[in-house]
Image (cartoon, rainbow, N blue to C red):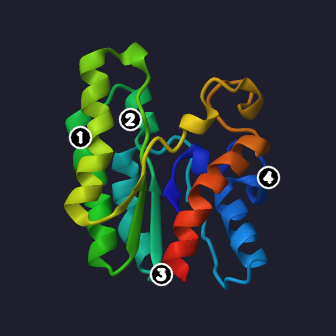
Amino acid sequence: MLGDSITAGLGLPVDRAFPAVVQQTLRAEGLDLDVQNAGVSGDTSTAGAARVNWLLKQKPDVLVVELGGNDLLRGQPVAVTEAKLDEIVAAGVGAGAKVVLLGITAPGSVGAEHKAAFDSIYPKVAEKHGAILVPGFLDGLMGKPHLLQGDGLHPTADGQKVLAEALVPVVRQLMQ
């Protein structure tokens, strides 16, 4: 799972981050899988694009991509985010992995035009490459302060469970 601080589980033990929770849940169901947490706090889509080929050398069956939130927070141009996510997904598909793209929804505070442009990235990239899109991946956390750490951005352990619950059915289907 290639991602940023959300994937890495910032502020939590690594076994409480959603990649580990996905692995624990599916192993408990009898699926034999190893989930590698390749989340790096602060990563942008550009940084993810720089690391993806190294990750693909491990020949994963599935590549889950959770990137773009830091691009949005840093004001990176939408076109750059789209190009880098496109590069990552294309690399995963080209390496023979089933790719899952975790969509991020921009807040309304960025302005209607920017929000529309940003929100359109994930469906476009997923459709272009035949990747599986999980739209609004973080939306289940919004407006629920008990699922977020004090910074209001990073999930608590319970918030990570909510993210895992959204992803488990997708990974289960791909691994069966």
Query: Marks 2 and 4, how far apart in space?
Result: 25 Å
Query: Dot 1 corresponds to which residue?
Result: 80
Q: Circle 4: is it few (<14), some (14-19), or many (20+) Cα within 10 Å?
A: few
Where residue 153 appears, x then y in whole percent? 61, 29
Side of 9 relative to 39 (left or right): right
Q: Secondary structure at mark 4?
A: loop
Find residue 13 and name its label: 4
Rendered position, 163 above or below 65: above
Query: Dot 3 corresponds to which residue?
Result: 58
Q: Are marks 3 and 1 in contact (CB under 8 Å)?
A: no
Residue occupying the point 29% across, 17% down: 112
Residue occupying the point 30% across, 73% down: 93
Query: Marks 3 and 1, how far apart in space?
Result: 27 Å
* Rendering quarter of residue 76: top left
Query: Marks 4 and 1, how far apart in space?
Result: 32 Å
Q: Secondary structure at mark 1?
A: helix
Side of 74 relative to 161 (left or right): left
Query: Dot 2 corresponds to which residue?
Result: 71
Where residue 99 appears, x then y in whole percent? 39, 67
Rendered position, 69 above or below 88: above
Q: Are marks 4 and 1 in contact (CB under 8 Å)?
A: no
